[in-house]
Image: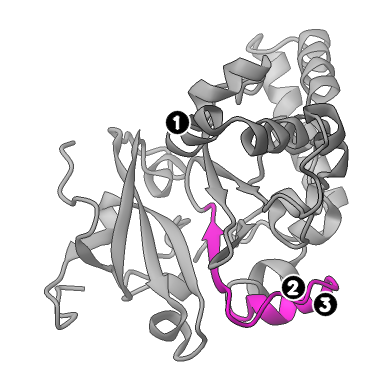
């Protein structure tokens, strides 16, 4: 799967709340962040945990402000996110969830 | 759901044993081989490895630059690697500076650079640490007895995928005359996780 995002790009995580395992942590859902780097390509654990075939896809380090994630705080948190869980978003933070 | 990996250790151990038995019954793994591989890995996996990495990085600017851009490749300089498990894990080393302090966590379970730090401490796997350090890292550091300069920003690295993280602490003042071995002796496991200063 080709890389859809580049370092420095703003992205929004999806708002999925599946009944099965997902590697997108709950606290980082529907949040806007910035791509730090591309880690490589790995199969999606959300699929593998269900025995579903999964092609490797890009995984990104994404930086979020604590304010974006928790509504407050001065620190930042990076989360490692599979491409499936990311959407492009504009500077206003608009993006399809 | 995020995948609840918690629960009593005994029940997890029982589940692991059950899976292991199934794999053995189907001839996919051999119990003796598994024990040998695990023992060999754990014998090499030790916080002293991470300490050597930090000491070398403090002394050797070229090594430090390579460590921060391609950690896996640079580990070979010290005879170390992120292999030992089923596959080599990607390592990302994050450097503390006067301006930024880094802390590592795995909020979904307990991912940890075992090859460089040995098995993780119990508190690292606790729900309290995993849930709180992403929300209020400065308060958590204070509870570890680490009063970080209020002017220093904090980045928390959540190992939610296939990468493992290691913090490169700041070199302590007054250590200009120490050699690599002496510097490594100063480095603590908690410093390499980011919950202590060196």
- Quadrant of the frame with the N terminus of chain A: top left
Label 2 sits on a secondary structure element that is helix
Is residue B191 in sight in this rendering? yes
Magenta span of residues: B135-159
Which residue corresponds to mark 1?
A: B70
Q: Nearer the viewer, mark 1 or mark 3?
A: 1
Mark 3, Cα crowd under 10 Å, few <14 / some 14-19 / many 20+, is: few
Q: Residues within 10 Å of mark 1 (few under 14, many from 20)?
A: some
At horizontal 46% and vertical 80% (from top left) the residue drawn is: A66
Vertical position of residue A36 compared to residue B100: above or below: above
Whether callout 3 and callout 2 share a subunit is answered yes
Work out whether residue A44 or residue B88 is closer to the camera in this orientation and state it.
B88
User: Splitting the image into 4 quarters, where does residue B131 fall?
Assistant: bottom right
Q: Nearer the viewer, residue B57 or B23?
A: B57
Whether the magenta-drawn stretch holds residue B141 is answered as yes
Q: Chain of mark 2?
A: B
- For the residue pair B38 and A66, the one nearer the viewer reads as A66
- Occupied quadrant, residue B78: top right
User: What residue is rendered at 59% in x and 16% in y?
Assistant: B76
Say above or below: B7 vs B179: below
Pick whichever of labels 1 and 2 is earlier in the sequence: 1
- Which residue appears at 49% of the width and 40% of the height? B162
For mark 3, name the chain: B
Q: Which residue is mark 2?
A: B141
- Kindly identify which residue carries mark 3: B143
Instruction: Tell me if label 3 and label 2 are in contact, CB under 8 Å.
Output: yes
Residue B64, percent from left and from top: 54, 35
């Amino acid at each position: 799967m080709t890389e859809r995002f580049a370092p420095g790009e703003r992205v929004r995580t999806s708002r999925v709340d599946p009944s099965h395992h997902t590697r997108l942590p709950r606290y980082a859902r529907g949040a806007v962040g910035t791509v730090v780097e591309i880690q490589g390509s790995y199969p999606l654990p959300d699929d593998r945990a269900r025995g579903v075939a999964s092609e490797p896809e890009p995984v990104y380090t994404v930086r979020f402000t604590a304010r974006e994630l928790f509504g407050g705080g001065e620190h930042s948190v990076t989360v490692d996110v599979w491409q499936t869980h990311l959407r492009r978003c504009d500077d206003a933070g608009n993006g399809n969830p | 759901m995020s995948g609840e990996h918690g629960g009593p250790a005994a029940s997890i151990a029982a589940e692991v044993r059950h899976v292991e038995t199934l794999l053995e019954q189907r001839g996919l793994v051999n119990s003796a081989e598994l024990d040998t591989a695990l023992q060999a890995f754990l014998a090499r996996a030790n916080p002293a490895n991470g300490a050597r990495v930090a000491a070398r990085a403090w002394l050797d600017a070229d090594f430090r630059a390579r460590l921060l851009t391609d950690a896996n490749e640079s580990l070979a300089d010290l005879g170390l690697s992120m292999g030992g498990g089923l596959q080599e894990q990607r390592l990302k080393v994050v450097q503390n500076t006067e301006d930024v302090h880094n802390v590592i966590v795995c909020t979904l379970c307990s991912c940890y650079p075992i090859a460089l730090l040995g098995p993780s401490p119990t508190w690292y796997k606790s729900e309290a640490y995993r849930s709180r350090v992403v929300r209020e890292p400065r308060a958590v550091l204070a509870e570890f007895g680490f009063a970080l300069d209020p002017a220093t920003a904090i980045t928390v690295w959540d190992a939610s995928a296939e990468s493992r993280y290691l913090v490169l602490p700041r070199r302590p003042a007054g250590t200009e005359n120490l050699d690599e071995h002496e510097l490594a002796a100063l480095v603590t496991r908690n410093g390499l996780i980011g919950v202590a200063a060196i």
